[in-house]
Image (cartoon, helix red, strand yellow):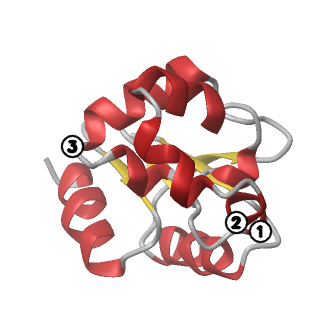
């Protein structure tokens, strides 16, 4: 099984996550989030499959999020507007995003990755 690893190569968390995948023998397709930003349709699918709140897909610590004052704007937006907004710039999306057959993970939490990715590979 192959997974999609959506990352920003300069991000230290993404580098750490990539090393984790390699250390666990997980093959993946690498996608640069800034050069090949997820589409609104992809984000919608990933969000629905993840089971997480849409806010977890926003890079809340990023400069662009802060510059756009999204903390105040997001509560008044519809879900479709949030997907559209996220699709405008990869720097708005929390990273890394890992998409497998039966999981979508946002951010790098080692225990969560082990529970989902490794379990998925041992099925």
Whether the residues at callouts 1 and 3 have beta carbons within 8 Å, the answer is: no
Q: Earlier in the sequence, mark 3 or mark 2?
A: 3
Name the mark on residue 63: 1
Which residue occupies the foreground of this view, 1 or 61?
Answer: 61
Query: In this rendering, would 8 be left or right of 118?
Result: right
Whether the residues at callouts 3 and 2 have beta carbons within 8 Å, the answer is: no
Most extreme residue toward the left, as rendered? 123
Which residue occupies the foreground of this view, 91 or 21?
Answer: 91
Whether the residues at callouts 1 and 2 have beta carbons within 8 Å, the answer is: yes
Distance Cα–Cα, label 3 vs label 2: 25 Å
Do we see residue 30 in this rendering? yes
Identify the residue at horizontal 68%, vertical 59% (top origin).
65
Identify the residue at horizontal 59%, vertical 61% (top origin).
59
Which residue occupies the foreground of this view, 109 or 21?
Answer: 109
Pointer 3 residue? 51
x, y (%) of residue 90? 73, 46
Identify the residue at horizontal 57%, vertical 22% (top origin).
40
> Where does the N terminus fall, quadrant-wise?
top left
Do we see residue 101 in this rendering? no
User: Which structural element holds mark 3?
Assistant: loop
Query: In this rendering, would 8 be left or right of 40?
Result: right
Question: Which callout, 3 or 2, points to the residue nearer the camera?
Answer: 2
Name the mark on residue 66: 2
Q: Earlier in the sequence, mark 1 or mark 3?
A: 3
Distance Cα–Cα, label 1 vs label 3: 26 Å
Which residue occupies the foreground of this view, 76 or 48?
Answer: 76
x, y (%) of residue 44? 43, 25
In this rendering, is residue 48 above or below 110?
A: above
For the residue carrying disc 2, how many other residues have a C-alpha within 10 Å: few (<14), some (14-19), or many (20+)? some
């Amino acid at each position: 099984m192959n997974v999609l690893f959506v990352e920003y190569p300069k991000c230290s968390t993404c580098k750490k996550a990539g090393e984790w995948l390699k250390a666990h023998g997980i093959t993946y397709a690498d996608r640069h989030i800034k050069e090949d930003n997820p589409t609104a349709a992809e984000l919608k699918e990933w969000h629905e499959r993840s089971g997480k709140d849409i806010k977890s897909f926003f890079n809340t610590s990023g400069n662009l999020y802060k510059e756009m004052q999204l903390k105040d704007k997001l509560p008044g937006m519809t879900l479709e507007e949030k997907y559209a907004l996220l699709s405008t710039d990869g720097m708005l999306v929390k990273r890394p995003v890992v998409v497998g057959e039966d999981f979508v993970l946002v951010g790098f939490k080692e225990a969560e990755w082990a529970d989902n990715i490794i379990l998925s590979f041992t099925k």
